[in-house]
């Protein structure tokens, strides 16, 4: 059976300035990593059919949003006029 050895690191002996710099660098590294992953995440679809479907879907959602906005405006106008 394999024996595993785990090393523990004690950072309590570091000077305050060094600990501060290491902490800032580690946080900065995580921010850059997650920011980079978020930045490269949403990419354009490669094939033309997928791009056309996405454009058609976006146009449909925009059209539905305009219709919904107009319908609510007309309902509010009718509600003001009713009493």
Image (cartoon, rainbow, N blue to C red):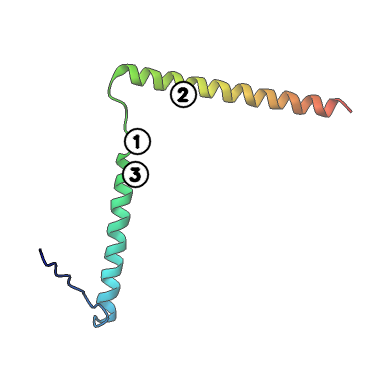
The quarter of the picture where residue 82 lies is top right
Disc 1 element = loop
Q: As displayed, is residue 31 above or below residue 39?
A: below
Residue of label 1: 42
In-image side of 62 versus 67 (left or right):
left
The x, y position of residue 72, in whole percent, is: 70, 27
Query: Do callouts 2 and 1 mark residues in contact (Cβ within 8 Å)?
Result: no
Look at 27% across and 81% down and name the residue there. 12
Look at 28% across and 20% down and name the residue there. 47
Q: As displayed, is residue 29 above or below residue 75?
A: below
- Farthest residue in the right direction? 83
Mark 1 crowdedness (10 Å alpha carbons): few <14, some 14-19, many ≥20: few
Sequence-first tag of 2 and 1: 1
Residue of label 3: 38
In-image side of 27 versus 71 (left or right):
left
Disc 2 element = helix
The quarter of the picture where residue 11 lies is bottom left
Mark 2 crowdedness (10 Å alpha carbons): few <14, some 14-19, many ≥20: few
The x, y position of residue 7, in whole percent, is: 17, 72
Residue of label 2: 58
Look at 32% across and 42% down and name the residue there. 39
- The image shows a total of numbered marks equal to 3
For the N terminus, give its image quadrant.
bottom left
Q: Nearer the viewer, residue 6 or 51?
A: 6
The x, y position of residue 5, in whole percent, is: 14, 70
- How far apart in space, not on screen, are marks 2 and 3 (Cα)? 22 Å
Disc 3 element = helix
Q: As displayed, is residue 68 above or below residue 20?
A: above
Sequence-first tag of 2 and 3: 3
- How far apart in space, not on screen, are marks 1 and 3 (Cα)? 8 Å
């Amino acid at each position: 059976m394999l024996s595993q050895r785990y090393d523990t690191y004690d950072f309590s002996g570091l000077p305050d300035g060094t600990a501060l710099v290491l902490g800032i660098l580690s946080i900065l590294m995580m921010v850059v990593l997650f920011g980079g992953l978020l930045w490269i995440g949403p990419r354009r679809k490669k094939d033309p059919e997928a791009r056309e479907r996405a454009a058609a879907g976006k146009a449909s959602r925009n059209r539905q949003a305009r219709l919904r906005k107009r319908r609510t405006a007309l309902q509010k106008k009718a509600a003001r006029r009713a009493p």
